[in-house]
Amino acid sequence: MSKVLVIGAGGVGSVAVHKMAMNADIFSDITLASRTLSKCDAIAESVKARTGVAIKTVQIDADDVAATTALIKSVGPKLVVNLALPYQDLAIMDACLVAGVHYMDTANYEPRDEAHFEYSWQWAYQDRFKDAGLMALLGSGFDPGVTSVFATYLKKHYLDRIDTLDILDCNGGDHGQHFATNFNPEINIREVTAPARHWENGAWVTTPALSHKQSFDFEAVGPKNMYLMYHEELESLARHLPEIKRIRFWMTFGDAYLKHLEVLQNVGMTRIDPVIYNGQEIIPLQFLKAVLPEPSTLGATTKGKTNIGDIATGIAKDGSARTYYIYNICDHEEAFAETGNQAVSYTTGVPAMIGAAMILTGAWGGAGVFNMEQMDPDPYMDMLNKHGLPWSVKELQGPLAF
């Protein structure tokens, strides 16, 4: 039984603390912190109503390393679970080092003033965490997170060698809005509009954003258009599984979403550089975020399912060439009934809880900075099945045709 401090009170933070409260044998004491205390209090009320567990809440500006360090020391957790914005990763890692506690997050660091994200900033903390005898686990969401564990599970149990890996992320849900994002609009739009990159034959291949489209028939969702994108797990998988010749990430988008996004880009609303309005400096994308629906409010109206998984081709245990598809299907309405949040938040918040459980129970350990694919996949996969994200594996007739 362990104390945990969760920083971040969006949809993912809400799901994570709900699921932590449902596992009181692991999470004996939960504190939820955010810049906006009212969000923490609302989540705490829901957790109490749904589970009977009381969690503590506190206000914190996670950009303030000294204040965050003081909070960590005051709470005395074994682990800090960072579910705040990716901009704040390094500040929270710094605070964990000073306070002497383990660290975990679900998305890698990116600077506020540049739509660019990579692991180099966090990997640079390796020696500091190792020398302190502390663990920093990066990317325990779904993608990144579960998708990397899926790959290592296939490598451990099905394939001696993975040659190609495709990660397919499909959200078949409908929230009834003309335009809304299913997670933080600022992060979502920065991610979607960035140039696409994939790993092939030891090098990065860069292409314009949303320029490569393919159709795929997703179980429980149906045929969807998906687009080649860059996602941070490609970088860590290329580093830790260097045998893989090609790694790609695909995400589905509807035509209406893309048309709205094109218009917003054309009129400058997705810019991240400051502009002067009425004598005041504003960031257009941050203003857009303020007028779009809050993702955590979409759960009540969202219907449909998500389907996220990996397709891996390689050499099987018997020496033959095989292709396997490992995936999870999550229902938006079922996720909302359990936690008050839609499936996009659920599929990140549940893995955040499981990653934290891996550290707190000692199933995963070590001193330094780690990515998910460096860990034993089996205990994590077992918890996915038990806590709301069951997965399936099936063999395909052959590799993807594209």
Image (cartoon, helix red, strand yellow):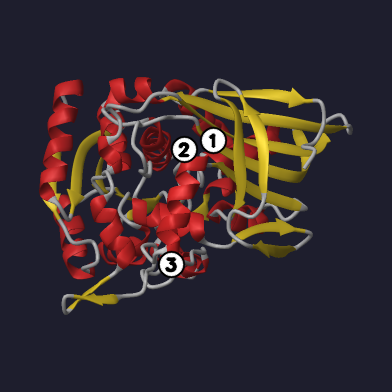
**N-terminal of the two: label 2 or label 1?**
1
**Which residue carries the number 2 mark?**
363
- Mark 3 or 1: the one toward you: 1
Please, what secondary structure does the residue beneath circle 1 have?
Answer: strand
281 with respect to 97 (left or right): left
- Label 2 Cα crowd, 10 Å radius (few <14 / some 14-19 / many 20+): some
Q: Amino acid at mark 3?
A: Asp
From the viewer's perspective, is residue 124 above or below residue 47? below
**N-terminal of the two: label 3 or label 1?**
3
Q: Amino acid at mark 2?
A: Ala
Quarter of the image that includes the N terminus:
top left
**N-terminal of the two: label 3 or label 2?**
3
Indicate which disc residue 131 carries. Answer: 3
Q: Position of residue 99 (x, y in %)?
A: 25, 62
Q: Is residue 1 visible?
A: no
Q: Position of residue 168 (x, y in %)?
A: 60, 39
- Label 3 Cα crowd, 10 Å radius (few <14 / some 14-19 / many 20+): few
Q: Amino acid at mark 1?
A: Cys
Please, what secondary structure does the residue beneath circle 3 have?
Answer: helix
**Which residue carries the number 1 mark?**
170
Mark 3 touching mark 2, by CB under 8 A? no
Task: Say which residue appears at 27% left-offset and 64% top-offset.
Answer: 95
- Label 1 Cα crowd, 10 Å radius (few <14 / some 14-19 / many 20+): many
190 with respect to 393 (left or right): left
The answer to which image quadrant residue 100 occupies is bottom left
Quarter of the image that includes the C terminus:
top right
290 with respect to 170 (left or right): left
